[in-house]
Image (cartoon, rainbow, N blue to C red):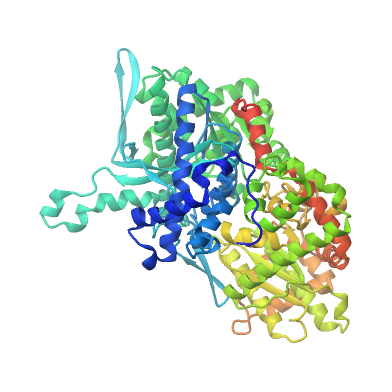
Amino acid sequence: MNTGRTVETPSAFNARSDGDVEQLRQDLVENLTRTQGKFPAVATRNDWYMAAAHTVRDRLLQHWVHSSQTYYERKARTVCYLSAEFLIGPQLGMNLVRLGITKNLRRAVSDLGLDLDDLIEQEEEPGLGNGGLGRLAACFMESLATLRVPTIGYGIRYEYGIFDQEIRNGWQCEIADSWLRYGNPWEIARPEIRFDVKLGGHTESQLENGQYRVRWIPEHVVRGTPYDMPVLGCGVPTANLLRLWKAEARESFDFQAFNIGDYYGAVADKTDSETITKVLYPNDAQQKGRVLRLKQQYFFVSCALQDMIRLHLQRNETLLGFADKYAAQLNDTHPSLAIPELMRLLVDEHQMEWEPAWDITQRTFGYTNHTLLPEALERWSIDLIARLLPRHLEIIYEINSRFLEQVRVVFPQDEARVQRMSLIDESGERFVRMAHLACVGSHAINGVAALHTELLARDVLRDFHEMMPEKFSNKTNGVTHRRFLLVSNPRLAHLITEAIGDGWVKDLDELRQLEPLAADATMQEEWRQVKQANKRDLARHVQKVTGMVIDPESLFDVQAKRIHEYKRQHLNVLHCVTLYNRLKRTKRTREITPRTVLVAGKAAPGYFMAKLIIKLINSVGEAIERDPDTRERLKVVFVPDFNVQNAQRIYPAADLSEQISTAGKEASGTGNMKMALNGALTIGTLDGANVEIREQVGAENFFLFGLTAEQVAARVREGYQPRAIYESNAELREALDQIASGEFSPEQPDLFQPLVDSLLGNDPFLVLADYQAYVECQERVGKAYGNPGEWTRMCILNVARMGYFSSDRSIRDYCRDIWNVQLPAG
């Protein structure tokens, strides 16, 4: 994490007595004794971190209890955010900013002979997400609390989160993310709140008082126990709730089995049950992985809905007002089973008739779509759902039957459309289309960037948009600048606050006040000093974790995101090889701007091509480093284990932000927003939120290249011919031939042949089609970086115009258009 001058939140908390240095020091020592059972002379750094975390948590809980009581008394409408991921990041530094006590705790810790930055670094990050989806959920939770919107986030307490990534011989190796091994000081277990979750078995139907009723007889029952984490708003006394569910057995120990010597059988139910929340996103290439993922998705939504019903019935006699009390948002299709589950709970468990139950269900749920990739639109086989969730399959069939009747009324004599819109895919192996289920069972459907929403309506969900256009809207993603500027880049935050005041912390649009300063020579010099200090910090980290020495004076060209072919890290590599060849050929090296290309991100464990791209990045980097003709002007470095903590190191140091996905493939992106917010200029296609970033910052402050989404679609329709591009472009041919020949893998010459074959074959991501435009755009980048005054002016303007991309704005849009929640005044 970057060090530098601390910027406090403008907050009433600063005046609180429990934020005084002396009180904090006393509480630290007391928590060291009471929670860790240690005294200062023998305490480890982790002991002190735990003491600091508990000291901060004690203050969070005061606000949490007060907020909960207020919500209870006011019967406040509550947003329930259902997400399989919450990539919340390290909590100590963030909570200090929210409370406004960073300076005082730093002094208290220093008085005890410790360094607060060391304690912040000690924290094990909860790896409860894979990428943008989970990070967005965390940003939204922070903004909801800051805007004082009553909220519960519901998810899974994965025992092992997204894997820790190590690089061995250039390859990604996955290491178990044991984030709970030292405990989690931020959570509170709630064993008194437990819910049974049924799995398997069969259903029985019968008439009860003349009404048709169904009873589900499960084969197995798992128990869900919640673990609660407070999420405090920034500069306000409001704390919301993140409730994560752990799976447990109803009976952890079978005494009868133990007595007859079946020692494994005695704990079999415990082992089977706890496996459900053991690991984030098990590899679903095998059937066992798919079964486990479906169990996970159903488990957490069932627990969440039973909890929502429990809370509702504390103050109400019936569930008729359920949809008025709760606005539940489905964060992509992972929680889509919440729709048949709420129907089951209302109809089967609470004896409600179908029509009012369906009305409540539709009015309760909203659906956020996060992907345009057909393979990422979830489908579950009918056979698997029938085996695990027999009652839900019956409900899904009933929903589908009633819905298709409506389709036939609106579009008579159009059976092709009926088949396309059906919740059941009847072609080949039969599947339930989870995105269709989410569309039908929700009152609102939204994309997460203007282009994404347009393509959803035009292509992916076209039939649904034509039938129910009133459901669709766009809600462009945003990020929380409190974490990704105030906490992660304190030097820049301090410079901005000195220049325009601290109003931007609560209202990011205040950054507009920087615009008149963009051409000011003094401001530019101070801005460059901040950037260079951040780059030196990152250079030290890179040397520590990779052994590579990089020059902070060089252009830091950064691509940090999940490794995937559509994000086109291999296009970046082709440019690196082209630069390498140019440096080798010419003696006029001064014409080529010194550049350090930094790539970070994780590949899914079962995604061979993505892992091969990581290997190629490392192999190219090693070859360049070995060559004395090039290593002083070009570096290619893969930074391992990209997570929130490492993102907070990388974003503030980036000069150039690589957002080079194939147009029409990225839903939104949020890394593009975070790097721009930290003063990096963007090189990108017109894809996802890049379109809106370019509109906001100005076309002249954005390095645009590549085909548009319409041109990509047209090229594919016409028959994309990558080999013809290869044959006609000498530099591209040279780079691909080097990769294919084994120049970067002499120990295994054909190692990268699958990647080359993909690029020259039926590459759906059109890498070669955008190669020349990308290389030429990078030349413009290099020339622009050679003019420090102009480059810095552009950077300042980028930051000044990023107000629209605050997650606060996103949440206001959701509250107004989807959740029907009125924000508190002031």
Q: Quadrant of residue 509?
A: top right
Residue nearest the observer in this picture, 189 or 256: 189
Q: Position of residue 184 (x, y in %)?
A: 41, 53
Q: Nearer the viewer, residue 711 or 507?
A: 507
Disc tally is 0
Query: Which residue is pictured at 82% across the width and 73% down the height?
Result: 731
Asked if residue 256 shows in the view, the reply is yes
Query: Which residue lies at the image location 44% right of the left edge and 20% below the top edge?
Result: 354
Screen quadrant of the C terminus = top right
Question: What residue lies at 78% left-to-right and 78% top-to-bottom?
Answer: 633
Extreme residue toward the left, this view: 260
Q: Position of residue 220 (x, y in %)?
A: 29, 42
Q: Residue farthest to the top?
A: 210
x, y (%) of residue 269? 26, 49
Q: From the viewer's perspective, is residue 13 above or below residue 631?
A: above
Q: Residue at x 72, y 52 (%)?
A: 677
